[in-house]
Each structure stands twice: as structure tokens, then as C-alpha cells.
Amino acid sequence: HPVPPAACSGSLLKAHYLRARARLARHRFAGAHADIASARSLVARGVGDASMARQLDQIARETDAAQREARRSNRRLAKEVARFADKALGSLGDDHPLGKSDAVEEAEEFADAPLH
């Protein structure tokens, strides 16, 4: 038998919330943000309650924090890889075309770029 629209909307809200949680756990930040936005639009139309709105705010904060941490981690990794590459390529000598590298300087410039 068909499900009433209100119950269906509540299920849809919960589905978006749970999928956002799953995407956050997998570091799929864009998808998590999209699900949060969809869930918030349902809340704005009167689906769900204040508790769900708070849960959405909480998962949005968690997603933003995890995304910032992933960027920081990526920056550290980029610097480490650049140092390794400089060390490996430096052993080739300055006469070799690959012997000179400015990867560390470029990685440091990348590290100084603002986080969005």
C-alpha cells in the first residue's frame, strides 16, 4: 500500500542525513554537503523537527572540520613528497636535467595558500 507523503518526506530526510554521515566517513565531502543541503531544504519545508535541524547543523560542522583537516594533511604530505623528490633528484647531480628541483619551494607556496 502507498506511503503517505509526510511519512515519505520524513524517510527521505533521514535517508539524506544517513547518506551524509556515510559520505563523511568516506571523506566524500562534496556529496556530504549536497545531502546536508537537501535535508535542510526538507526541514525548511516543515519536514522533521528541531532535533533533526540540530543534527544537520552538527554534521555540517563535522564535515567542515574533517575537510579542513584533510586539506592540512594533504599539504603536509605534499611537502614530504617534495622533500623526498628533491633528495632523490639531487643525487643525480646538478649537470643532470632532473638534478635541479624547486619542488620544496613550490610545496611551501602551496602550503601557504589559504584554506577555503
Image: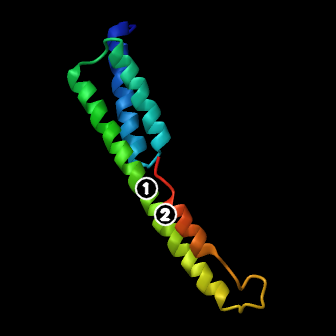
> Considering only order in the chain, which callout, 2 or 1, is on the residue closer to the N terminus?
1
Q: Where is 111 relative to 81, above or below? A: above
Give the residue at x 26% y 26%.
Answer: 52
Q: How many marks?
A: 2
Q: Is residue 11 above or below residue 73?
A: above
Q: Foreground residue, 3 or 78?
A: 78
Instruction: Say which quarter of the image contains residue 37.
Output: top left
Q: CA distance from mark 1 to mark 2?
A: 9 Å
Instruction: Using the image, tell me which numbered label, if any, was put on residue 75.
Output: 2
- Does dot 2 land on a helix, a strand or a loop? helix
Residue located at (39% from left, 44% from top): 24
Q: In x, y percent, where is residue 14?
A: 33, 26
58 in relation to 94, above or below: above
**Residue 89 versus residue 21 in the image, above or below:** below
Left or right placement of residue 5 versus residue 105 in this view? left
Residue at x-position 48% and y-position 37%: 31
Residue 103 got which mark? none
Task: Please tell me how crowded label 2 is: few (under 14), some (14-19), or many (20+) other residues with Cα within 10 Å.
Answer: some
- Residue toward you, 49 or 78: 78
x, y percent for residue 11: 35, 21
Q: What residue did someone put label 1 on?
A: 70
Q: Can you give x and y, in whole percent of width and height, for residue 9 in the image? A: 37, 15
Work out whether residue 65 or residue 102 is closer to the camera in this orientation and state it: 102
SS state under label 1: helix
Q: Is residue 111 left or right of residue 101?
A: left
Residue 88 figure quarter: bottom right
Eye-nearest disc, 1 or 2: 2
Question: At 55% across and 79% down in the image, what residue appears?
Answer: 83
- Callout 1, which amino acid? Ala
Circle 1 packing at 10 Å, graded few (<14), some (14-19), many (20+), is few
Q: Viewed as shown, does residue 85 lie left or right of 48?
A: right
**Mark 2 residue type:** Arg
